[in-house]
């Protein structure tokens, strides 16, 4: 539409390109106001080739072609005259594929070919060409098909083919036009001149083994790119002048040698021979069978020694068929003595070496290159006592999603996929994959789980066998080494020795849900983060070398071989590791962090921000005897990333002890979070100095002990405030957003503190106030202290007292008084949702079961314990109504005695003895409410209690509905005990003293829980119609019923799909930068006519990958102007909303408005700063009409446009200057008119050679001034 914006998202990890092109596959004008490209630059393009190459061998050589167009001057020789402004021109559409051919007049070894296109127009005619190579006898020796166009000029690498004649055949029957054809190589008969070779010193043993001319060797990546490995060909061995050196054809890419790594030889590339004498090769097929190669399986052969050594396996693996891999031990159980050694797996279609249900196999010194899916792998977790020794894998690409089956994870392929730690991994190298290097995805699956030795085995808790001397670099996703997401509950004493991780795009180490791994020695360098501790309890780094930016990395930047991105993160401390489970960092050296990087955790040690959840720093790390090479304190430690950049919550009360002063560089002390009065109010801060930009103070000569007060989280939603007082100062303790749903979950709310020892005889007192500042009690309060610090003087448990408020009749008369329907209601459902509705003017609470819920529903609420402790001997009245329903919403009757009946439990715990009352309730099947009414006398045995609860439980597979519940204190005699008579307990209860200071409560937003790993925070306080800011599209658009009309806020306009398709659909993207918590969906039908067409439709929510996460089916018709509302399951998070006809129903789909009500959330920042890269860059187009240059679409002005001529297949392209990561492309349409022309367009990403990398399609028209993204 006029002035509209369309945005296309490229969120694959490998969306790296230099050019962006927008094109039509139809005859129309192409005009756009502005094109913006968001991402970041990868590297500067080298200014020259690293090695000189010979001159153009085709220049002025004899050339012929299939025809010459109208006998004009487009003769064949124009392609070899050295003039790019002249061109050849054959006939057009004369029934044959036109060709052109050159005679080099001798046999040459050919390295590259460069083809120049016709420059004045019609460049799109040269596309999908095939190159044929012939020897001196005119016998075909090599065929090289290509795809796509060549732009102005394109070079093609040739595998050093020896040929005299080269022929180019066009991909269709159009004209063949060549501006210039250049060939580079060496005379084959005379040998390649030594001065044109590159020299690789690989050592005498390797050189003697690999010395045969023509041998192919693989060089791995030395950058962050997982795919930067490539093949070179050995030309000769110059053993006399330089023993141990191979002479190879000029390297296609510059690589790092040992003498360029500044003392770190691991940074040099690995080199491996790919050729073997024994070749096992799958037959090559075309079309749909192209990825079905051979497979080699050792099947059900227990106790038989099997050996395969020294084979090259090519075109192996059958993609999409489970169990068909290049080398595969399958369900052979114990095969002690069997070996797979010194083999090469090259271009596998599916995985590399797979051990499945087999044990005691030795997999050693194998090379895997340019393959797809997990490479060296243990398939089901039931494999043990296998040895993986000195294997190398590089350039491991992903398999398509769902291949070989849905539950597999090969879309994020690892070089080593480990499902059972009871195997040895020694000296292996993961040298580049689209996923992690080493991935511990520990799980036991069938059929290996059915072996007798694997019954009741849980791989996540098994001891780790030897894991030593392994290295991972150039990993494309997540980490070099990771335990995400299954985790590894390793037993204490588990050691990973001398692990090396460097130049990984994510982290060197990414540990999740893991315990007790001791990293001894090793190297972590040039990673996005050195170690990402995401829930790794008791992690130990002992003697590790950690480098932010190495000299070698700076060398590569200076050479222009990688970009200047700040991949220089250090070790992370996760805020919520848990008390007693903090990270230990000792005897470790840090350097390379004072490097000018900004944005993200670019510090030697930083506090992380993953799923901070409850917003507390609850585990004290142990940090001592470490060294920092000339690093200022501002680059050594930082907490801002957690405090200000946490998707779930801000972190509070960061307290880190510097045991020996090696972290601060001065003396022992504590790093303390700034602006935390709950900490800094209780010691002298004059000795503290602020860490520059670190969100921390460093305070000498103090000793603090971390603690957590756990309180009832349902009452924290009512803005209760906790206060700490030492008799002189009182400070508020802030709470944060609680993980999962604050309103209705059973979890506690943690309130952090960090205190020095109390003054003698003057303990700290903890009190609570409600939202009005009145004394209150939060249901329960429980103190936990972290282990004592190494210093002397931290607070002890006996120095902290809780003070309950006075249990007056006014305060305790109605224990449900804080209920605030429908927003906050005090009830909690165990990890599931609640829904509030109205019935006859009364609020009704309904439970909502989820698929993963346990067998019964548990409804509970916490009660003010102080009201019971202060009213011993008095009577409380419990009352309410309840119904029970099955999963279909039918009311269910129960007899009030069996386990099929709801059970009510009232309990007071933590005192001299627990007080528990239970009773069952009979329910009805006719919709009648069952009434509850009980009086309970509070006994004296509860003295000292700290928790009271009311629970509704024990309804197997049923849902509850409750209404009109309460608990009141009956007005009668005075309490048996006065507050001053309360017996003491630890922590002690005392009568309240109203605090002298309190924080004003702030409005919070609470959202439904989600099964997805969302780390975003809500950005709105109330639900809004998210669709209004979305982007709509449909499977078709007829009669000007454009998709965007369903989200224009006007229920008099409609979208209109064409009427000839089954399952018509319309979809709304709720926002590129957001995930959304959805509460309800509203569908409004057209009002003027034809309302009966809207029937048999599905309303769906989809995640970012377009997986359906919520669906409802509506069978009947809606009617003219009809409205249908769909209440969404609590906790559903989505990016897309879709309405579609059932696949069996064919009719027009038209809707007036689609409203999606919920809360947007902020996606965490990209690991690299996302910038707009297109503005001001060079733009070209197929044509330029009306003086609207191509550059008008990247001039920053949306009132200027580019306008092509209205000819066939127009295109527009912008050159970003260098290869770049592209997150999304935003196109703003022209505003003044004709916006409907921007439709059925393709947005393409092209690499440096204009090869297609990825694309997105714009189907419907965008509209004047609209934006498509």
Image (cartoon, rainbow, N blue to C red):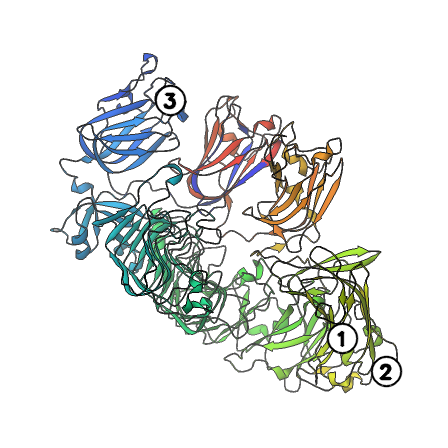
Position of 102 with respect to 70 (left or right) is left
Of tags 1 and 2, the one toward the viewer is 2
Of tags 2 and 3, the one toward the viewer is 3
* Quarter of the image where the N terminus is located: top right
* Quarter of the image where the C terminus is located: top right
Q: Secondary structure at mark 1?
A: loop
Quarter of the view holding residue 876: bottom right
The location of residue 1243, given as percent across then percent down, is 50, 35
The location of residue 839, given as percent across then percent down, is 81, 56
The location of residue 175, given as percent across then percent down, is 37, 20
Q: Which mark is residue 173?
A: 3
Residue that mark 1 sits on: 994
Kindly report the distance in space between the C-alpha atoms of the residues bearing marks 1 and 2: 23 Å
Q: Are marks 2 and 3 in contact (CB under 8 Å)?
A: no
Quarter of the view holding residue 853: bottom right
Q: Are marks 1 and 3 in contact (CB under 8 Å)?
A: no
Of tags 1 and 3, the one toward the viewer is 3
Give the residue at the far right of this rendering.
972
Relative to the observer, which residue lies in front, 14 or 345?
Answer: 345
Q: Are marks 1 and 2 in contact (CB under 8 Å)?
A: no
Kindly report the distance in space between the C-alpha atoms of the residues bearing marks 2 and 3: 103 Å
The location of residue 1154, given as percent across then percent down, is 68, 41
Residue that mark 2 sits on: 974
Q: Earlier in the sequence, mark 1 or mark 3?
A: 3
Q: Secondary structure at mark 2?
A: loop
Position of 1180 with respect to 131 (left or right) is right
In the image, residue 660 above or below residue 630:
below
Q: Secondary structure at mark 3?
A: loop
Whether residue 275 appears in this view of the structure is no
Q: Earlier in the sequence, mark 2 or mark 3?
A: 3
């Amino acid at each position: 539409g006029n002035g509209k914006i369309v945005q296309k998202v490229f969120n694959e990890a490998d969306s790296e390109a230099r050019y962006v092109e927008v094109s039509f596959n139809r005859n129309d004008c192409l005009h756009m106001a502005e094109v913006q490209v968001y991402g970041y630059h990868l590297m500067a393009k080298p200014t020259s080739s690293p090695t000189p190459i010979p001159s153009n061998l085709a220049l002025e050589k004899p050339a012929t072609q299939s025809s010459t167009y109208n006998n004009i001057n487009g003769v064949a020789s124009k392609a070899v005259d050295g003039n790019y402004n002249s061109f050849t021109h054959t006939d057009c559409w004369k029934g044959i594929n036109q060709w052109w051919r050159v005679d080099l007049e001798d046999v040459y070894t050919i390295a590259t070919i460069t083809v120049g296109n016709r420059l004045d127009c019609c460049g799109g005619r040269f596309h999908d060409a095939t190159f044929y190579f012939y020897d001196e006898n005119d016998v075909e020796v090599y065929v090289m098909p290509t795809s796509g166009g060549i732009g102005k000029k394109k070079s093609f690498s040739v595998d050093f083919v020896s040929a005299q004649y080269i022929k180019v055949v066009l991909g269709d029957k159009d004209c063949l036009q060549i501006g210039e054809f250049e060939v580079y190589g060496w005379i084959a008969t005379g040998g390649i001149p030594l001065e044109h070779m590159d020299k690789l010193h690989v050592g005498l043993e390797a050189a003697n083994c690999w010395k045969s001319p023509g041998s192919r060797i693989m060089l791995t990546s030395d950058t962050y790119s997982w795919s930067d490995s490539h093949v070179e060909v050995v030309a000769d061995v110059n053993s006399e002048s330089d023993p141990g050196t191979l002479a190879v054809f000029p390297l296609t890419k510059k690589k790092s040698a040992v003498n360029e790594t500044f003392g770190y030889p691991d940074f040099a590339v690995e080199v491996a021979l790919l050729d073997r004498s024994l070749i096992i090769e799958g037959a090559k097929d075309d079309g749909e069978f192209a990825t079905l190669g051979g497979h080699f399986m050792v099947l059900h052969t227990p106790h038989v020694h099997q050996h395969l050594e020294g084979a090259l396996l090519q075109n192996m693996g059958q993609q999409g068929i489970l169990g068909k891999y290049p080398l595969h031990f399958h369900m052979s159980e114990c095969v002690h003595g069997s070996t797979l050694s010194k083999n090469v797996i090259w271009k596998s279609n599916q995985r590399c070496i797979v051990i499945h249900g087999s044990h005691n196999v030795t997999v050693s010194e194998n090379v895997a290159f340019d393959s797809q899916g997990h490479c060296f792998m243990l398939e089901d977790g039931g494999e043990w006592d296998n040895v993986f020794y000195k294997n190398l894998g590089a350039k491991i690409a992903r398999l398509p999603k769902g291949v070989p089956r849905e539950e597999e994870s090969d879309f994020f392929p690892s070089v080593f996929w480990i499902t059972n730690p009871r195997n040895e991994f020694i000296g292996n190298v993961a040298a580049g994959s689209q996923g992690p290097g080493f991935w511990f995805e520990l799980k036991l699956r069938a059929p290996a789980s059915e072996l007798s030795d694997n019954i009741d085995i849980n791989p996540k808790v098994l001891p780790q066998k030897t894991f030593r001397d392994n290295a991972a670099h150039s990993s494309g996703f997540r980490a070099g080494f990771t335990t995400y997401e299954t985790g590894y509950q390793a037993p204490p004493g588990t050691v990973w020795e001398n692990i090396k991780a460097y130049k990984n795009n994510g982290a060197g180490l990414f540990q999740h849900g893991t315990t007790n791994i001791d990293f001894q020695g090793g190297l972590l360098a040039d990673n996005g983060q050195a170690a990402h501790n995401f829930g790794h309890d008791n992690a130990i780094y002992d003697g590790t070398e950690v480098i932010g930016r190495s000299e070698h990395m700076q060398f590569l930047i200076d050479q222009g071989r990688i970009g200047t991105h700040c991949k220089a993160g250090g070790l992370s401390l996760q805020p919520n590791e848990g008390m007693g489970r903090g990270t230990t960092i000792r005897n470790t050296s840090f350097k390379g962090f004072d490097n000018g990087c900004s944005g993200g955790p670019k510090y030697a040690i930083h506090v992380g921000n993953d799923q901070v959840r409850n917003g507390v720093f609850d585990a004290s790390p142990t940090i001592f005897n470490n060294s920092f090479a000339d690093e200022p304190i501002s680059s050594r430690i930082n907490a801002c990333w957690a405090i200000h950049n946490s998707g779930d919550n801000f972190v509070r009360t960061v307290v880190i002890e510097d045991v020996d002063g090696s972290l601060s560089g001065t003396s022992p002390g504590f790093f303390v979070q700034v602006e935390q009065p709950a900490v800094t109010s209780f010691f002298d801060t004059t000795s503290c100095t602020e860490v520059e930009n670190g969100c921390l103070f460093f305070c000498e000569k103090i000793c603090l002990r971390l603690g957590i007060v756990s309180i009832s989280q349902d009452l924290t939603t009512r803005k209760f405030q906790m206060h700490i007082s030492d008799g002189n100062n009182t400070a508020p303790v802030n709470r944060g957003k609680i993980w999962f749903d604050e309103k209705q979950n059973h979890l506690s709310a943690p309130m952090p503190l960090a205190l020095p020892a109390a003054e003698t005889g003057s303990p700290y007192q903890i009190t609570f106030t409600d939202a009005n500042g009145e004394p209150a009690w939060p249901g329960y309060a429980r103190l936990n202290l972290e282990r004592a610090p190494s210093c002397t003087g931290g607070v002890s448990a006996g120095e902290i007292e809780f003070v309950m408020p006075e249990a007056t009749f006014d305060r305790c008369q109605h224990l449900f008084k804080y209920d605030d329907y429908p927003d906050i209601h005090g009830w909690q459902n165990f990890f599931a949702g609640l829904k509030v509705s109205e019935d006859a003017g009364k609020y009704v609470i309904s439970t909502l079961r989820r698929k993963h819920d346990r067998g019964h529903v548990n409804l509970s609420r916490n009660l003010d314990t102080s009201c019971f402790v202060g009213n011993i001997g008095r009577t409380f009245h419990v009352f309410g109504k309840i119904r029970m329903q099955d999963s279909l919403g039918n009311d269910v009757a129960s007899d009030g005695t069996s386990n099929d009946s709801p059970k009510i439990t009232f309990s007071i715990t933590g005192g001299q003895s627990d007080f528990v009352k239970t009773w069952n309730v009979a329910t009805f099947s006719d919709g009648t409410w069952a009434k509850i009414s009980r009086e309970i006398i509070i006994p004296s045995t509860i003295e000292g209690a700290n928790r009271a609860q009311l629970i509704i439980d024990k309804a197997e597979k049923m849902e509850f509905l409750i209404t009109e519940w309460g608990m009141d204190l009956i007005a009668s005699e005075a309490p048996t005990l006065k507050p001053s008579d309360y017996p003491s307990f630890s922590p002690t209860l005392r009568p309240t003293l109203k605090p002298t200071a309190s924080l004003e409560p702030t409005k919070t937003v609470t959202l439904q829980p989600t099964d997805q790993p969302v780390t975003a925070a809500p950005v709105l306080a109330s639900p809004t119609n998210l669709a209004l800011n979305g982007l709509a599209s449909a499977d078709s658009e007829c009669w000007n019923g454009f998709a965007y009309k369903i989200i224009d806020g006007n229920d008099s306009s409609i979208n209109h799909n064409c009427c000839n398709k089954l399952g018509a659909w319309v979809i709304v993207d709720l926002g590129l930068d957001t995930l959304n918590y959805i509460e309800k969906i509203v569908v409004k039908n057209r009002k003027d006519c034809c309302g009966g067409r809207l029937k048999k439709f599905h309303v769906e929510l989809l995640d970012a990958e377009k997986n359906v996460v919520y669906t409802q089916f509506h069978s009947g018709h809606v009617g003219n102007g009809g409205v249908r509302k769909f209440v969404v399951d609590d906790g559903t998070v989505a990016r897309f909303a879709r309405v579609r006809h059932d696949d069996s129903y064919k009719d027009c789909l038209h809707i007036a408005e689609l409203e999606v009500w919920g809360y947007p959330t902020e996606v965490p920042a990209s690991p690299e700063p996302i910038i707009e890269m297109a503005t001001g860059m060079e733009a070209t187009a197929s044509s330029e009409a009306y003086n609207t240059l191509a550059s008008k679409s990247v001039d920053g002005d949306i009132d200027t446009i580019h306008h092509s001529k209205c000819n066939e297949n127009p295109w527009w392209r912008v050159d970003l200057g260098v290869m770049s990561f592209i997150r999304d492309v935003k196109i703003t349409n022209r505003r003044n008119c004709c916006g409907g022309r921007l439709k059925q367009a393709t947005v393409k990403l092209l690499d440096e050679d204009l090869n297609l990398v990825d694309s997105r399609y714009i189907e419907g028209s965008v509209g004047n001034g609209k934006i498509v993204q």
